[in-house]
Amino acid sequence: MKLGIDLGGTKTEGILLDVDGNELIRKRIKTEKNYEGTIEGITTIVDDFEKNFGKVSSVGIGMPGAVSTESALIKNANSLWLNGRSLKKDLEKKLNRNVNLENDANCFALSEAVDGAGKGKNVVFGVIIGTGVGGGIVVNKKILTGINSIAGEWGHIALPNRTLDEIKNVNKCYCSHEGCLETYISGPGFAASYNLRNNTNLNSHEIVNSYLNNENSKRALFQYVDHLARGLSIVVNILDPDIIVLGGGMSNIQFIYETINDQLKKYVFTDKCLTKIVKNIHGDSSGVRGAAWLG
């Protein structure tokens, strides 16, 4: 059996898979926004599963951020209470077993590469476009983390060729830099840019749901796809993946898939772009399934 935990900023989800990847049990709880509460929530899920199915030898956990190769502490997490903490060590002590800790976008990419939209592909780039923007690289079903543990973190490179309008109508990123793709193509970033430009106070769902009857919303969606294509063209030019799989809340916008592949071709340095951008297969389950596959 394989036990995976998806540690998110608002919810913590656990899943138990059999050796063939079939789901045995699943549980979701609210994430406590403090370190001790987070660890306690993970422990509760593991204990509940093992009462019914017996003990597992290891636990896979997908989380925001990464483990520093220098200090073994969490870094770059937008769940700020995790940063600077020895999460792996503390969980192994609490659970009394090995814990495999990985970035949540890496887990998403692994899930889709093993038995999702990227199944059978050699190089899969998994994209999270939700509350934040992240990415993960899987080569031959193995996660590529990189020497700094930041492989795939395309959300914190700048949107290329920004116009004056794009510079003006965007907020500064939480990472302290300006122009990050996350501030344009995350759900909150998309909404914030729209609101700055149109003097409104809408969330991303309201903007997307109104695009058929609202010219400002329609224009914003076309611009969103262009931002996404410009950002992903950098990934294709450097990594040249077989496939790009989109996940996260913004990946549910059907309009993206009607236009994104044609838009990508405008920016990629090749005569014919063979890399396809597709929607995930496992949906919200991809992250937690990928965490389970870590084991």
Image (tube, helix red, strand yellow):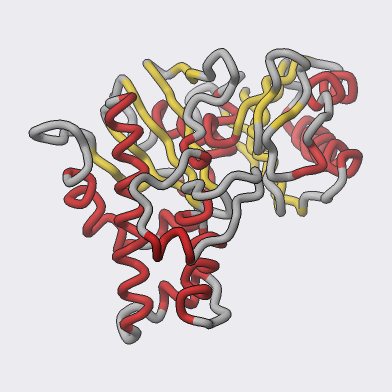
| Residue with the most extreme bottom position | 213
Q: Residue at x 57, y 49 (%)?
A: 132
Q: Position of residue 34 (x, y in %)?
A: 87, 46
**Does residue 247 sit above or below 121 in this rendering?**
below
The answer to whether residue 258 is left or right of residue 94 is left
Q: Position of residue 58 (x, y in %)?
A: 71, 18
Residue 131 in which image quadrant: bottom right
**Does residue 122 sit above or below 62 in this rendering?**
above
Residue 60 in which image quadrant: top right
Q: Residue at x 36, y 40 (%)?
A: 245
Q: Nearer the viewer, residue 254 or 172?
A: 172
Q: Residue at x 51, y 68 (%)?
A: 191
| Residue with the most extreme front position | 164
Q: Nearer the viewer, residue 33 or 283?
A: 33
| Residue with the most extreme left position | 271
* Image quarter in which the C terminus is found: top right
Q: Residue at x 31, y 20 (%)?
A: 122
Q: Position of residue 46 (x, y in %)?
A: 78, 33
Q: Nearer the viewer, residue 94 or 268?
A: 268
The answer to whether residue 245 is left or right of residue 284 is left
* Image quarter in which the N terminus is found: top right
Q: Position of residue 32 (x, y in %)?
A: 83, 50
Residue 289 in which image quadrant: top right
The answer to whether residue 22 is left or right of residue 82 is left
The answer to whether residue 12 is left or right of residue 271 is right
Count of numbered circles in the view? 0
